[in-house]
Image (spheres, rainbow, N blue to C red):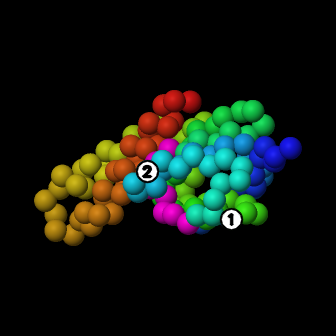
Amino acid sequence: MANQTFHLSILTPYGHYFDGEVEFLEVRSDKYNLGILPGHAPLISTIAISKMRIKAHGREMLYAVGGGVITITKEKTTLVLDSCERADEIDLERAKEAKQRAEERLNSNENAVDVNRAKIALLKAINRIEVGSKY
């Protein structure tokens, strides 16, 4: 009988976020959605600021991820992410405030504004709001 789970390790700048067996993983690269099941072919790809779904022990969880890299080998799947929050961990008020601050920076006429950084902050805030609202 084939293995029905695979080992998933999620690392963030704050350390190990998750380390265990899962049945399914869905993440978004810059160009496509990746659906990972046991026995997936080896792969290395970037991960976009997006939502992520994990199914483990028959339960599905939704996360907001801040971009990163995925590595799939025969032994395990590893995600190295800038940030990762489960839907029920997201502070919606804080995410809305971050969105407002990013929008204000983008709309300001100040030359000192780092536009790329403000755009990334806006994308992360919008993603967190969308994921957190589904909880």
Q: Report which residue position mark 1 lands on.
A: 73
124 or 9, which lies in front? 9
102 or 133, which lies in front? 133
Examine the residues drawn in magenta and state their main secondary structure: strand
Is 119 located above or below residue 128 in the figure?
below
Q: Is residue 107 left or right of residue 72?
A: left
Residue at x-position 46% and y-position 55%: 29
Percent coordinates x, y for residue 79 in the rendering? 61, 60
Mark found first going from the N terminus, 1 or 2: 2
Percent coordinates x, y for residue 27 in the rendering? 53, 49
Few, some or many residues within 10 Å of mark 1 (<14, 14–19, 20+):
few
Percent coordinates x, y for residue 93 in the rendering? 45, 37
- The extreme bottom residue here reads 112
Residue type for callout 2: Tyr
Is 112 located above or below residue 8 in the figure?
below
Percent coordinates x, y for residue 72 in the rendering? 64, 62
Q: Report which residue position mark 2 lands on.
A: 32
Instruction: Answer yes or no: is residue 6 visible.
Output: yes
Q: Which residues are magenta?
A: 44-51
